[in-house]
Image (cartoon, grey):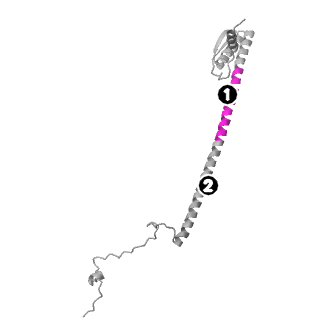
Amino acid sequence: MKSSRSRSRNKNRNNNRPSGGNIVNRVFDSSGPEGKVRGTPQQIVEKYTQLHRDAILSNDRVNAENFAQHAEHYTRMLAEAQKEIDAKREEQEKQQRERQVEQDKQNRERQAERDRERAERLKAQEEAAAAGGVEAEEGGSGLVETPEEAPKKRRTRKPKARPDQQPDSAAAPNDGAAPEAAE
């Protein structure tokens, strides 16, 4: 009777096929009629294709067919792996597009919310200004008028006297008293 320990070892040995992963770059050992061929699936296909051509040139149809079948096997492995890679890429692109659509939707919602808040603030400011204008007319706003808000009074300057002209005030000084009558 075998122990459970040896059975578990046998289970692992029988599972020689790689499970998942990227087989495009994985290195394989292929046991063909000419011995072992080691490399990535693409390298193995190229090697068996070259061996196939050589066998055809040496009129060895049996080995030529054997090499062709080995090359076809690794070609199919590459094609299947490429399909999986393409399917994963398409799925990732689809997910990326969905995330982008969702993100765009959220951005539009945020912008709409900001626009609503801005409109509400403007409306509240307009209402406050309208209410403030009514109160100011009634005189109950309680706000102090600042110099910037007060209407500006224009000052007018007297023109400066030119040196060649005598101002009227210099000829007859007026200290605020009534002019005296000439005697």
Per the picture, the main secondary structure of the magenta-coloured stretch is helix
Residue 86 part of the magenta-drawn span: yes
* Residue 45 figure quarter: top right
Which label sits on residue 85? Answer: 1
* C-alpha distance separating marks 1 and 2: 46 Å
The answer to whether residue 145 is above or below residue 84 is below
Query: Which residue occupies the extreme bottom position in the image?
Result: 183
Instruction: Indicate the quadrant containing the C terminus: top left, top right, bottom left or bottom right.
Output: bottom left
| Segment colored magenta | 75-100
Q: Position of residue 92 (x, y in %)?
A: 66, 33
| Residue 161 shown left or right of residue 141 in the figure | left
Residue 179 spot, x, y in % from top left: 29, 88
Residue, disc 2: 116
Q: Quadrant of residue 49?
A: top right
Considering every residue shown, the one lying at the far left of the view is 183
Question: Against 172, is 127 above or below?
Answer: above
Callout 1, which amino acid? Ile
